[in-house]
Amino acid sequence: MQLRARAQDAGAEAAAAEKDAEGENEADGAEKAPEKPDPYLLADAAYIQKETRWRNKQRTLIFQSRGVTAQFRHLAEDFKKLLPHHKSEPKFEKREKLHEINEICELKSCNNVIYFEARKHTDLYMWIARVPSGPSMKFQVLNIHTTGEVRLAGNCLLGSRPILYFDKAFSELSFLKLMKEMISQAFGTPRNHPKSKPFHDHALCFYWMDRKIWFRHYQVSPEGPDDLDDPERQSLTEIGPRFVLDPIRVFSGSFSGQTIYANPFYMSPTALRVHARQMLRSPYVQKLKTKKDRKDRIKENELPEDPLDSVFE
């Protein structure tokens, strides 16, 4: 027992000696390492230090209603790939009230929601709302072309942060300013989000044309191998998807509240189908209408009598 105790004491003394030797070597190395000069005190400048914490905690819930077609479902999947900060949810029952979406967002800790509502298996509507206080916007989605359909040459890194581009109309019209802010909060990927990558290699573009919002998705890539760091020599290659948003209404609350804006030029799909049936009704009735329209145009384009025509009579 005495020999074992002596051996343990000897081992402990050897380990302590090794630690002391390592500490002396580290101290010598620290003394020999020269300090880098910092004449401008940049190490203490907080305004140039990179932020690594996730502060802007925007989360967007993306889901759809029952009755969506395969094309509508693929469009929703494209949205999920574009927005790495999204959260998904099973399909929403049509018999439920829309204001119940606020409870789903609260359970998912989401403050934005993009909800696709399908009707008659032919018409698709999209809601963009801030939860729980609002406002909320309702659009009809037209001319849908998913990424799998168009098969364009563009490509981008999955999970990278997009550049949001809006044309000048979004800075001039009052209701478009609100839509720009809502779209920026729902589509903009927060900085330092855990599921995002710190790159900007694609752009989400929104254009106002023909009283509708046209969406395009482009890849941002250099024109040549020597133009990686030159922002003036970057090219755009379309990726997809494509679609057009026809504004319908803007409400003050989340899926409820007073109407802030109503599009006076909007026609529902049912009204458009009724108008198309009226245009394709009996050929004889259409012929009479064409004759009447022609007479009205001739009458409107008649020139007034010129008093100088009878000067030489």
Image (cartoon, rainbow, N blue to C red):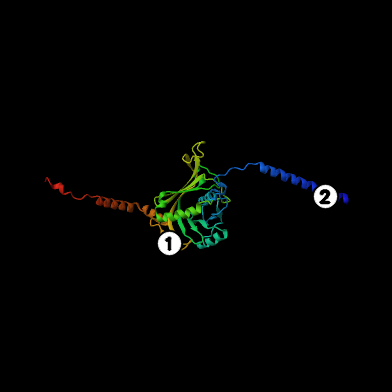
Res 152 seen here: no
Give residue 149's position: percent from left, percent from top.
50, 45
How many numbered callouts? 2
Q: Nearer the viewer, residue 30 or 157?
A: 30
Numbered badge on residue 110:
none
Residue found 29% across the figure and 52% down from its top:
293
Which callout, 2 or 1, points to the residue nearer the camera?
Answer: 2
Q: Looking at numbered disc 2 in the image, what kind of residue is underneath it?
A: Asp
* Whole-number angstrom distance, CA of label 2 to CA of label 1: 85 Å
Instruction: Name the secondary structure under disc 2.
Output: helix
Q: Nearer the viewer, residue 114 or 266?
A: 114
Q: Are marks 2 and 1 in contact (CB under 8 Å)?
A: no
Residue found 85% across the figure and 49% down from its top:
6
Quick one: label 2, few (<14), some, or many (20+) residues within 10 Å?
few
Numbered badge on residue 259:
1
Instruction: Name the secondary structure under disc 1.
Output: strand
Residue found 67% across the figure and 43% down from its top:
31
Res 3 seen here: yes
Ranked by sequence position, the earlier of labels 2 and 1 is 2
Q: Looking at numbered disc 1 in the image, what kind of residue is underneath it?
A: Thr
Q: Is residue 213 left or right of residue 304?
A: right
Quick one: label 1, few (<14), some, or many (20+) residues within 10 Å?
some
Give residue 78's position: percent from left, percent from top.
52, 49
Give residue 301's position: percent from left, percent from top.
25, 50
Numbered badge on residue 9:
2
Give residue 46's position: percent from left, percent from top.
55, 50
